[in-house]
């Protein structure tokens, strides 16, 4: 069996380009006892992967040069010598960017194709959904009537955060990068207000106008000047969940902004960074509740699908250009074909 891989050829400086990646084709060895042959169906592209492309310490190890990028993949078992996975099973795993790969089964979880569309396990029923749920509910602790601001609001995590906040009876303000995204937040997802940060001249004034009662919870996917503007409107006892800082992921030096500590002090506010894995003990309950909300039609869900394995690098770049509304992933193959 031949497989195609996409490797990290060099470490990006600033915004990644095609030059940083290389495609390779090779022959896979025959399966050994205890192994499965997996065919990639859906491959996730996620902002955190940018951090792994750089050298240096983070919460996950950097990718090695000349090895395939790896991340969330939904795959079909097309051959098995593993007692737990039979041919035709569908699994989710942290797998290489390869059309076919061999696994010993470690870290794979089997998916039920009848529960929801399989690709949902990369988004609302997977890591981004769990991130939204845990960050908002455990750090944000939303209460009815409170105002929640979410940056990166039209993306995989942000769309779920805003909708859960609505389910909890909050006023929800989303910040995103196009008028189409703002329309989607307001008209499809039921957000109360939306701010297009790319066309708004004065973000502080826009946030003040959208949050007449101040900001009780800020769910931050972005960082930078958007956050500086939100901090100016925090209420007493506000909670800030630092989920992502995508505005900085391609920065070649660390920017400094206004000092936030005096605001945290005078507002008795809580700011907490988190990695979704910190809440692993709650994943069972979170996944169940997310699935129930999706099934009941209480959470809407959008996918931005890029077709074709070769387009993985371009799809990944799209995250930094704001091309996606909802969860961005690459469709490589159809289940069962
Ligand atoms: N802590 C965790 O465990 C955890 C887990 C998952 C994700 N995250 C973080 O959560 C954030 C969202 O992740 P996601 O998977 O849901 O991605 P996403 O929001 O679906 O996609 C990224 C979005 O970020 C926006 N963006 C890109 N560059 C920007 C910039 N310079 N300034 C402002 N906005 C920018 C773009 O939308 P616009 O059109 O609005 O610019 C883009 O669509 C990321 O920062 C990610 O690293 C953290």
Image (cartoon, rainbow, N blue to C red):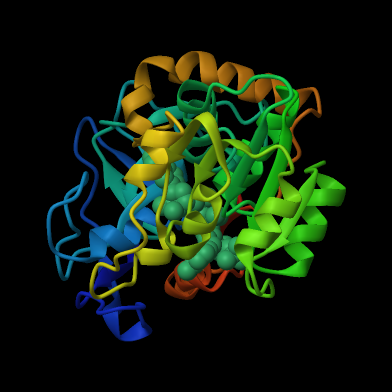
- Tell me which residue sits at (63%, 51%) in the image: 153
- Tell me which residue sits at (14%, 64%) in the image: 55
Using the rendered image of the protein, determine whether residue 221 is visible from the camera's viewpoint.
yes
- Tell me which residue sits at (78%, 43%) in the image: 191
Along the viewing direction, whichever of 170 and 179 lies nearer the viewer: 170
Numbered-mark total: 0
Along the viewing direction, whichever of 39 and 278 lies nearer the viewer: 278
Image coords of residue 74 (percent x, y): 48, 44
- Residue extending farthest to the front is 266
Q: Quadrant of the N terminus?
A: bottom left
Vertical comparison of 102 with 99: above or below: above
Using the rendered image of the protein, determine whether residue 335 is visible from the camera's viewpoint.
no
Image coords of residue 316 (percent x, y): 45, 67
**Location of residue 144 by image quarter:** top right
Image coords of residue 91 (percent x, y): 45, 35
Vertical comparison of 98 with 82: above or below: below
Q: Is residue 298 left or right of residue 17?
A: right
- Residue extending farthest to the bottom is 19
Q: Is residue 25 left or right of residue 218?
A: left
- Residue extending farthest to the right is 187
- Tell me which residue sits at (65%, 19%) in the image: 143
Q: Is residue 3 left or right of residue 64?
A: right
Image coords of residue 104 (percent x, y): 23, 35
Q: Is residue 187 left or right of residue 306?
A: right
């Amino acid at each position: 069996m031949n497989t195609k891989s996409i490797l990290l050829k060099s470490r990006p400086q600033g915004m990644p380009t095609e030059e940083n990646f290389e495609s390779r084709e090779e022959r896979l060895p025959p399966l050994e006892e205890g192994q499965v042959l997996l065919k990639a169906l859906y491959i996730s592209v996620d902002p955190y992967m940018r951090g792994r492309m750089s050298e240096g310490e983070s919460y996950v190890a950097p990718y090695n040069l000349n090895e395939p990028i790896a991340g969330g993949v939904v795959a079909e078992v097309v051959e098995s010598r593993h007692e737990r996975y039979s041919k035709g099973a569908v699994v989710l795993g942290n797998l290489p960017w390869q059309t076919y790969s061999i696994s010993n089964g470690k870290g794979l979880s089997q998916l039920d194709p009848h529960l929801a569309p399989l690709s949902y396990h990369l988004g609302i029923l997977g890591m981004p959904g769990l991130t939204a749920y845990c960050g908002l509910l455990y750090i944000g602790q939303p209460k009815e009537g409170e105002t929640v601001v979410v940056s990166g609001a039209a993306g995989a995590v942000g769309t779920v955060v805003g909708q859960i906040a609505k389910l909890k009876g909050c006023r929800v303000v989303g910040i995103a990068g196009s008028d189409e995204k703002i329309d989607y937040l307001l008209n499809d997802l039921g957000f109360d207000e939306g701010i297009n940060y790319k066309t708004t001249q004065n973000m502080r004034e826009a946030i003040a106008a959208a949050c007449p009662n101040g900001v009780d919870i800020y769910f931050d996917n972005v960082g930078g000047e958007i956050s500086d503007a939100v901090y100016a409107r925090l209420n007493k006892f506000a909670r800030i969940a630092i989920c992502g800082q995508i505005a900085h992921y391609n920065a070649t030096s660390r920017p400094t902004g206004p000092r936030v500590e005096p605001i945290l002090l005078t507002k008795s506010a809580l700011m907490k960074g988190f990695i979704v894995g910190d809440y692993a003990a709650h994943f069972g309950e979170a996944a169940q509740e997310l699935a129930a909300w999706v099934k009941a039609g209480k959470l809407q869900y959008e996918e931005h699908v890029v077709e074709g394995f070769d387009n993985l690098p371009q799809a990944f770049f799209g995250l930094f250009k704001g091309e996606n509304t909802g969860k961005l992933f690459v469709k490589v193959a159809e289940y069962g074909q």
